Amino acid sequence: VQFVESGGGSVEPGGSLRLSCTASGFDFRIPTIKWYRQAPGKEREFVARIDGTGRRRDYADSVKGRFTMSRDNAKKTLSLQMNNLKPEDTGVYYCKADGYATWGQGTQVTVDS
């Protein structure tokens, strides 16, 4: 099982980024997959999740209305569209599938003026 996150970078407050996650090693169509993030000096926290069909999505209150998660089961990829970014969105972003212990290396997002 492997996850590879990409798309991070540095943006100013109010900017946008689109993160991607490519998965391999399991049947991608089945599990709920989640995005997490970890800010410096803080614990990793839940950001968003999407079920296997892509029809149900849930978001942390802190990102609701600004972030949109999607998945393409044919390409085994996930996306996280992040708009109106805030400094508190800074951190390393990871994707992970329910039922699997594997984490990717993450992708760094920095929001700073």
Image: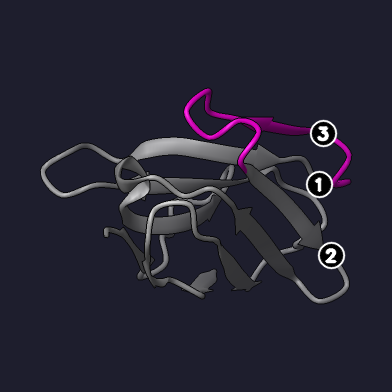
As drawn, is 94 to the left or to the right of 35?
left
Amino acid type at image mark 2: Asn
Instruction: Locate residue 110, reporting x and y percent.
Output: 31, 62
- Residue pointed to by mark 2: 73
Instruction: Locate residue 33, reporting x and y percent.
Output: 64, 48
Find the distance from the CA under tag 2 to the CA under tag 1. 8 Å
Residue at the extreme top: 61
- Residue pointed to by mark 3: 56
Residue 59 is one of the magenta-drawn residues: yes
Find the distance from the CA under tag 3 to the CA under tag 1. 8 Å
Instruction: Read off the magenta span.
Output: 53-66
Q: Which residue corresponds to the image point at 52% horizontal and 53% vertical from the top-left?
A: 96
As drawn, is 45 to the left or to the right of 80?
left
The N terminus: image quadrant? bottom right
Amino acid type at image mark 1: Gly
As drawn, is 56 to the left or to the right of 33?
right
| Between discs 3 and 2, the one toward the N terminus | 3
Q: Nearer the viewer, mark 3 or mark 2?
A: 3
Disc 3, SS: loop
Against 27, is 45 above or below?
A: above
Disc 1, SS: loop
